Image (cartoon, coloured by chain):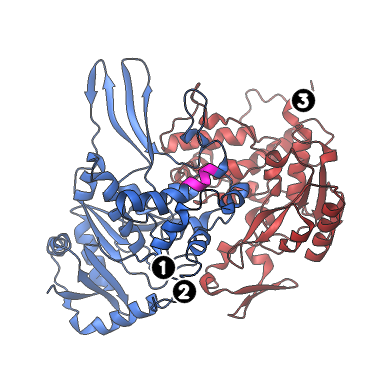
Amino acid sequence: MVDKIKELARSLLSEGKVDVIIAYGQGSFPFRSIPIFIEKAEDVDKIIFNSFCYHNLAKYIPQEREKKIGIVALGCTARSLSILLQERQIDRENLYIIGVACPGMIDFNKLAPKVNLRLVKEIREEGEELVILPQGIKLPRKDFLYKSCSVCSYPTPLLYDELLGEKREGQLAFPDVEEMEKLSLEERKNYLDERFALCIRCFACRLSCPSCYCKECFAESLLPRFVSHQITTEDNRLFHLNRAMHLAGRCVSCGECLRACPLNIPMFDLHRKLEKSVYELYQYVSGIDPSQPPLLATYSPKDPDLEGEQR
Amino acid sequence: MSKIYFAREEDIEKFLQNLKEKMTVIAPRNWGDVVVYAQIENPNEWVREGLPVRPLKEWFFPASEHLFYFRDGKIVEPKNQDEPFLIWGARMCDIASLKFLDKVFNSVYKDPYYIRRRELATIVLLRCREPMWGCFCKGMGITEEGADLILTPLEDGFLIEIGSEKGEELLEKSGMEFEDGEGRMGERDEFLRRFEGSFDEIYDKQGIYDFLKAAWEHPIWEEFARRCLGCGICTFLCPTCHCFDIEDENLTLQVGARFRCWDTCQFSLFTLQTSGHNPRPTKKERVRQRFMHKLAYCPERYSETFCTGCGRCVRLCPVNIDIREVLKLATAQGVTPTGQP
């Protein structure tokens, strides 16, 4: 896989089809990757691809958009690119999408109870198994996936110029949301508030989100002031609920917010609930068709009228 | 020569129960699926392994606090912490950070809120059994200075060493009589030897300073900045970062409040001026500022390198911007194995 990515990246760069390739490189631990920006064909060997390449690289599109961009896109990344195309944040002709059928990424924090991460020197992937070295511990991949990957609907990119890897089918289902819907409104509020209390508003959720590209976020607006700079549960709740509303029909459930959050605030649950609502109300799935207008930019007289209904 | 005690698990539980009736007890505890320093309800719910995600500084310098309220020309001061409290089971890197913060909040400028909480707190250190991935406290030369009591976890209980008079008073206050622990100092030494042997690198602080003073345009800032998301994780969760903002929130001109809250050099608003000019206009300047402040400006101003090696920024940065890369660049020739300076 990684060799094919490198080969493609090398030819795109040397033929001048792109100015930069946004890809994954090795981080400072065997189980961490970093987003890298390759501008010279001779640097393509810095590219890696493994089960720890979890970033949604579409985040970097606005920052790099003056250039012709090649980008390594997982299923979720490709959906984010669709959103950015729908919202006119980039031109399709300036984008070369190296689609990679995603095997689901591994949450290294879930490995911590099983292996002493400090001592890990190498992680090999043998089929559906992770082999942790030097300890020699073997672990099944499927038990350590990120939450977002375990409920992924489109692991294989829907939008690409070249597709690499073995296609995998996902399922458009919301088992996680259905679980939460069993809770009463009161229980949901208590669960969320307990977690919101921990939020320090570092804005990692917003800043890692490919759909959050506003130059001025409502959360930082001074005039008018929507959210106080005080760190209280109420202001934290206000921030997360507002941000979630801004992502209706725009969130692709890549889970980047949850991965970025240092305190595991479950904002992902809010986004998933919205994704389900959007699907049930408008039969709309975000990021699967770049030619569609954005959901909230459309109106139909047939749109369901929810007045008086409690959802 | 102060005494050394030994306490079994059940003695510690009773000890904390007794103290809990007299004062607030803060300790590392589970909150959802993360560990933070928070008030404990039960004397056995404190977490012994790992490092709380939010640093200890928040109990002295909270994420936000009201300074006063005003109504119809009258100023009302809020009821801040005014009772003695206990920090139980704090880790060495976090306690060390307070020594640094003291130089900021209690030297030229006297910060009454911080100083009051420092006076009220008694701090008990729990020695780490081993470093977590990304920890490098020994590499930064961090010591146990600042702990009022020092706990070493042994197989069947805890060795208790006294670090200060406050610590001794705490033992008296608990009304407990612990066994003599002098005979178990050998186990403690073995514990420390194993802990210290688990660090690969020590860093040369002078070398780091010299490097940074000449590294204003080093390519690493652009490399970091390009992938940096610009979030506040590395600074908000740093035990030594101490920047804050002061704001008034007015309901009307007659009614309102003044508060302060954590602020971070990683946000573009941090340096945005009313004119619209921003002296740190891009991520490059902001990323650089973080390293410069900790590793170059603080040594100049406070004679301390403001990094305790807690590793939070290393573990939690979503894009793996690793401060040790800067430390390694700086000490490229000076990195030596532990114990062989």
Chain at tag 2: B
On the image, numbered disc 1 is attached to which residue?
A: B139
For the residues tagged 1 and 2, is the chain the same?
A: yes
Q: Is residue B190 left or right of residue A94?
A: left
Question: What range of the chain is rendered magenta?
Answer: B285-289
Badge 1: few (under 14), some or many (20 or more) residues near its Cα, within 10 Å? many
Q: For the residue marked with disc 2, what is the amino acid? A: Asp
Badge 3: few (under 14), some or many (20 or more) residues near its Cα, within 10 Å? few
On the image, numbered disc 3 is attached to which residue?
A: A298
Chain at tag 1: B
Q: For the residue marked with disc 3, what is the amino acid? A: Thr
Q: Is residue B325 left or right of residue B168?
A: right
Check the image and name the residue furthest to the front.
B214
Q: Helix or strand or loop: what does disc 2 sit on?
A: loop
On the image, numbered disc 2 is attached to which residue?
A: B200
Instruction: Work out whether residue A285 can be spotted.
Output: no
Which chain did the image draw in blue? B
Q: Quadrant of residue B14?
A: bottom left
